Amino acid sequence: MRIAIDAMGNDNGPAPIVKGVKMFLEEGHESTVVMVGDRDRVNHAMIEEGIGLSHRLELVHASQVMEMEDKVADLREKRDSSIMRLVAELKEGRVDAMVALGNTAAAVGAATIGLKLITGVRRPGIAIAMPTRNPDRPCVVIDMGANIACKPQHLVAYGVMASIYSAKVLGLSQPRVGLLNVGEERSKGNVELRQAYELLEQAPINFIGNVEGGDIFSGDCDVVVCDGFIGNAVLKASETLASTMSTWIKEAIFATWYTKAAGMLLSGELQKMKKRLDYASYGGAPLLGVNGVCLIGHGRSRAPAVASALRTARESVTMRVNATIRENIERMRKSVRLKAVGVRTEAEPEKGSAAG
């Protein structure tokens, strides 16, 4: 299996990515990683890390980089950027999956334009596994920022795609899918949410109805569906809360000599909790709905998160996540009972682009 990764997408340059790639390759599987980026800078990072190119580690040169302040429209001016080269590797069949780091809007735009959408999917969605009270049962939230203005049919497709991902990659049987709303009653929310509720009831998923924000972390739901505006706000608030909680815990531990002693006794458990709260430890988030396995990673990802993203990409290919999504969406399109879902047919292209 061949997986490509954007070596220029980290805020700290290629070094953390090269280190993460090395960790991934040392796990013993037969995967090949193709790093895409500036040849000189990546080679320098490889020398620092003590690794070289081989049949399992390749490098594709890209002369440009999409910076964090760049807009999606700048992709036209940066056709030789690492993200554009990365998408080309997957589109042209030279790799089986890709991992994009850094500028999320650019990654979503490049993947949507270059790979196109699965027939029947109107908008791609970023799915992120959030920690819950049950350490073995994360909750997948979709969408986390790819599409800020969702229609009911977009939310239905999100529910189907995330349910498949949760089952295939996370190993959850019959994932419980909830629609994020201001209350559990089916009458809650605006017109779009009420329509989405009715359509999700008909979809081939284990839909449990409306859920509230707290259900993301309670462990009572496996998939939470929402638009990208709300999802991104949930993500950013959760990241900041996790960081703030870590600071509070550290302050409490170092408050007195006996709390320090207690902290030493609990150091192992505290490290486990810190890892569960750390966004960077979860690696990449799948961009579901595009024609190809595409993982989106944080620009501040450290080496373990990079290795985790590569691992998730490999698992997604192995478990045929995209093929299963395609089969289920096609089944929905052909179902008379689900015509109200409004998934696009070949003869009914939707105006607009997921890249915005």
Image (cartoon, helix red, strand yellow):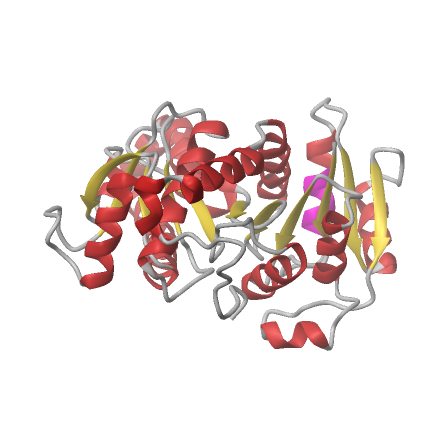
- In what quadrant of the picture does the N terminus appear? top right
Residue 340 lies, with reference to residue 135, above or below; the image says below
Query: In the image, residue 5 lies at what x, y percent?
Result: 71, 48
263 vs 194, nearest the viewer: 194
Residue 70 visible in the displayed image: no
Q: Give the residue drawn at x 76%, y 42%.
A: 95
Q: Give the residue drawn at x 31%, y 31%.
A: 262
Q: Which of the 4 image quarters holds residue 128?
A: top left
Residue 16 on the magenta span:
yes
167 vs 260, nearest the viewer: 167
- Left or right of 291? Residue 262 is left
Query: In the image, residue 136 lies at what x, y percent?
Result: 38, 26
Query: In the image, residue 20 lies at what x, y percent?
Result: 68, 41
Residue 129 on the magenta span:
no
Residue 347 lies, with reference to residue 69, above or below; the image says above
Query: In the image, residue 12 lies at what x, y percent?
Result: 66, 59
Q: Give the residue drawn at x 59%, y 59%.
A: 112
- Left or right of 160? Residue 81 is right
Which secondary structure dominates the residues rendered in magenta? helix
Residue extent of the magenta highlight: 15-21
Q: Give the residue drawn at x 13%, y 46%.
A: 184
Residue 152 visible in the displayed image: yes
- Left or right of 293? Residue 211 is left
Q: Which of the 4 image quarters holds residue 75?
A: bottom right
